Image: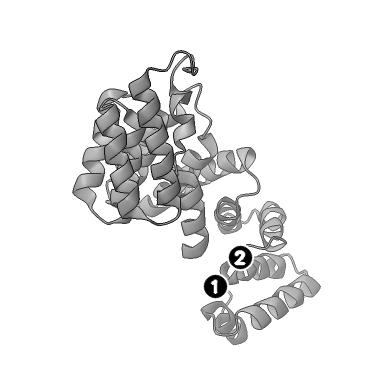
Amino acid sequence: MPMLLAMAVLQGCATPPASATSTTAEPITESDEPETRKRARIRLELASNYFEQGQTSVALDEIKQSLAADPTYGPAYVLRGLVYMRLNDARQAEDSFKRALQINPKDPDALHNFGWFACNQGRHTEAIQSFTQALSSPIYSGQAKTLMLKGTCELRMGRLPEAEGSFARSYELDPGNPYVGYNLASLLFRRNEDTRAQFIVRRVNNSELANAETLWLGIKVERRLRNNDAVKQLAQQLSRRYPQSREWAAYQRGSFDE
């Protein structure tokens, strides 16, 4: 599901500088923060905003200013890695994430983002190890997003039971994520867990983020449960909203195994 994945990853990978102190046992308050760290943090906040707006060059310049103020500021290296990932510069991205992990090997944000980088490089085993390390942090608030990307990587490896477990745990933490919901429902459907798949995919299809793939999965689930009215309703949506889609073409052919 490229569109839902892109949206999910955008939300899942962005590391707000404001959370940079969340990986320490006790957050640094304003009175504790050295002036150099404060300047680095403010620069990184600007860089993060530019990154979210797609202004990568400006974001990189702000990251440079952040690191000039404090070369030991790990979150700046994490964001630099994300920028280089967007620019398809694998060498610089990996160097950035590894620098962040040299500063703090247990930083869950750095581990999460390096895991996604490694997964996209086809280094799946390394990616799973990194995700697992991130998830082991008792103070990490991003468990749902890491489980989502771990499940995605496990799908790419063909490890379906493990992927289902990751998506199921992510869904428990964030049931509103349509990408997680679709993948969990799809895996349940493959195992003939039709009633559970129905509950989850219906929730996705009742949201504004439903697309041709989620509607098609919904059709197949409802068809196997012999809910003909629901099949017709979903098919009407698919025809009206996505008349040129391969899913609508498959429905017209009666190719429900696609």
User: In the rendered image of this protein, does residue 234 appear above or below residue 90?
Assistant: below
| Residue in the image at 40% along x and 48% along y | 153
Describe residue 164's horizontal placement relative to residue 54 as left or right: right
User: In the rendered image of this protein, does residue 160 appear above or below residue 248?
Assistant: above
Give the structural element (helix, strand or loop) at label 1.
Answer: loop
| Residue in the image at 72% along x and 62% along y | 206
The residue closer to the viewer here, 117 or 167, is 117
Residue 16 pos. (x, y %): 47, 38
Give the structural element (helix, strand or loop) at label 2.
Answer: helix
User: In the rendered image of this protein, does residue 180 appear above or below residue 32?
Assistant: below
Name which residue type carries label 2: Thr
In the picture as drawn, the residue positioned furthest to the left comes out as: 91
Of marks 2 and 1, the one in the foreground? 2
Q: Residues within 10 Å of mark 2 (few under 14, many from 20)?
A: many
The residue closer to the viewer here, 115 or 75, is 75
Location of mark 2 (residue): 214
Residue 106 pos. (x, y %): 36, 24
Describe residue 243's horizontal placement relative to residue 71 as left or right: right
Observer able to see residue 172: yes
| Residue in the image at 46% along x and 63% along y | 2
Residue 148 pos. (x, y %): 50, 45
Residues under numbered marks 2 and 1 in contact, where contact means CB atoms less than 8 Å apart:
no
Give the Cα separation between the discs numbered 2 and 1.
Answer: 15 Å
Q: Earlier in the sequence, mark 2 or mark 1?
A: 2
Location of mark 1 (residue): 257
Name which residue type carries label 1: Asp
The residue closer to the viewer here, 241 or 150, is 241
Residue 147 pos. (x, y %): 49, 40
Describe residue 44's horizontal placement relative to residue 225 as left or right: left
Residue 221's quadrant in the figure?
A: bottom right
Q: Residues within 10 Å of mark 1 (few under 14, many from 20)?
A: few
In the picture as drawn, the residue positioned furthest to the right comes out as: 229
